Image: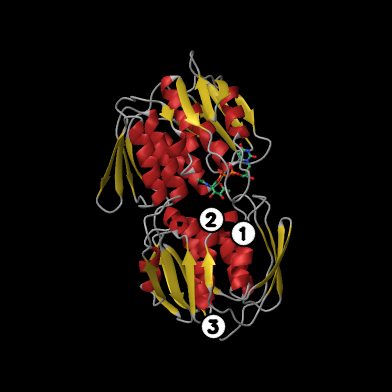
Amino acid sequence: MDSIAIVGGARLYGDIPVSGAKNSAIKLMAAAILTDQPLTLTNMPRLADTRFLGQLLRAFGIRVDELGADTTVLHAAELTSTFAPYDLVRQMRASFNVLGPLLARTGEARVSLPGGCTIGARPVDLHLKALQALGAEITLEEGYVHAVAPHGLKGTRIDFPFVSVGATEHALLAAVLADGVTVLRRAACEPEIGDLALCLNAMGARIEGIGTNTLTITGVRALSGTQWSVIPDRIEMGSYAVAAAMAGGEVRLTRSRPELIAALTDRMVAAGVEVSPTSDGVVVRRDPLVRLRAVDVTTEVYPGFATDLQAQFMALMTLAEGESVVHETIFENRFMHAPELARLGAEISVHGGEAQVRGVERLVGAPVMATDLRASMSLIIAGLAAEGETIVSRVYHLDRGFEHLEAKLAACGAQVRRIRGEADEH
Ligand code: UD1
């Protein structure tokens, strides 16, 4: 398995272009199941997760062609299978969400349950309830969900008990081809859901209320192909913004939109980082000789502080002056990075969903282990400011969600290199 070695202490100066959003790209790819015409996605990130999903879609008989640096054409002219085996689904949880579109297009699908995950139990009960409400008959057998809708899906009203990004997306991907009107209440309004809904509308769907917590979907008989540019990755953007603040220097994040990370930049400014919005991103400036102030954060659904940026922000707070409280409200076990940050000298105590970070004056490089995608990034960020060398192992987590990570950081002066290991098995 590969590792990443960072020698801390270098200031970062330069531009980092933000890639297309992983969490949008994989949903847009699933939308290709809904039409027999080609769907062309541009600004696609090339990541392990988009590769996993491409592999799964090919197993259904879908043509997936990667053209040039960032274009993918998906063509589901005809589906030859609606079976998603465990081996392909377990590699990436979100691939479970092919169930809804397969069902909507063909009336039948068998998809493996995604299984556990390091950041919590992450059940799919809301997904299944939504599909049942749309008229699917669902049976669970030997780790698989078998769903049938012999008479097609029917529009309905779905009141989610709490906000779930995955369940909202899944209901949307099924309801667009249902007969009649579906209303989703307490829907997630993350920008990636908006991106998916707008793309579906460009394909001929009729979705209203995009960007709000109530989505109204008037089902249509068929969808057509379209060309769609994937929204910028706000988590990647936020991660590099924090990286620049941690290392000090001046970094311009481009090809994005400042408002996508407003909740993060608000906290960064409160901590003493200079953040200036630009027409296509932000400039982050920090004098590393001036210590940051500790500030508290609470993760929330969009537009609140993203849980996917919690680990990175915690890394920043390890060197701030004072004590900050990081409150995680979305996932129940999302502080796996805390003991790894402690290996670099951070002082963090975790009680349930709350972590207290007592800022220290210095971190010292050490070997650490990545535990999940965003936690891995927090270790990279800490490594940028730690004295000496930090080696982050198990970077396959990072490869799932960060495109050209070392190249983007190195272009700004970071001393970072990949150490190639044996073939990954995970
Ligand atoms: C998505 C993102 C992930 C992000 C998360 C929250 C993708 C591919 N992943 O994950 O990066 O961290 O949103 O912004 O877009 N839950 C249930 N039952 C369900 C579904 C969810 O109890 O049927 C719970 C989860 O365990 C979790 C909470 O709801 O505690 C929120 O999860 P959800 O919003 O569904 O996250 P994902 O879609 O899995």
Given the current orientation, which residue lies at the most extreme left position? 68
Q: Badge 1: few (under 14), some or many (20 or more) residues near its Cα, within 10 Å?
A: some
CA–CA distance in space, label 2 to label 3: 28 Å
**Residue at the image position 45 percent from the left and 58 percent from the top:** 398
Q: Are marks 1 and 2 in contact (CB under 8 Å)?
A: yes
Residue 354 lies, in percent from the top left, at 72, 60
According to the picture, the residue beneath numbered tag 3 turns out to be 288
Q: Earlier in the sequence, mark 1 or mark 2?
A: 1
Residue sitting nearer the eye, 135 or 422? 422
According to the picture, the residue beneath numbered tag 1 turns out to be 336
Can residue 134 be seen in the rendering of this structure?
Answer: no
According to the picture, the residue beneath numbered tag 2 turns out to be 372
Residue 207 lies, in percent from the top left, at 49, 33
Instruction: Locate residue 289: give its quadrant.
Output: bottom right
Instruction: Select label 1 or label 3 by which is in front.
Output: 1
Q: Amino acid at mark 3?
A: Pro
As drawn, is 213 to the left or to the right of 95?
A: right
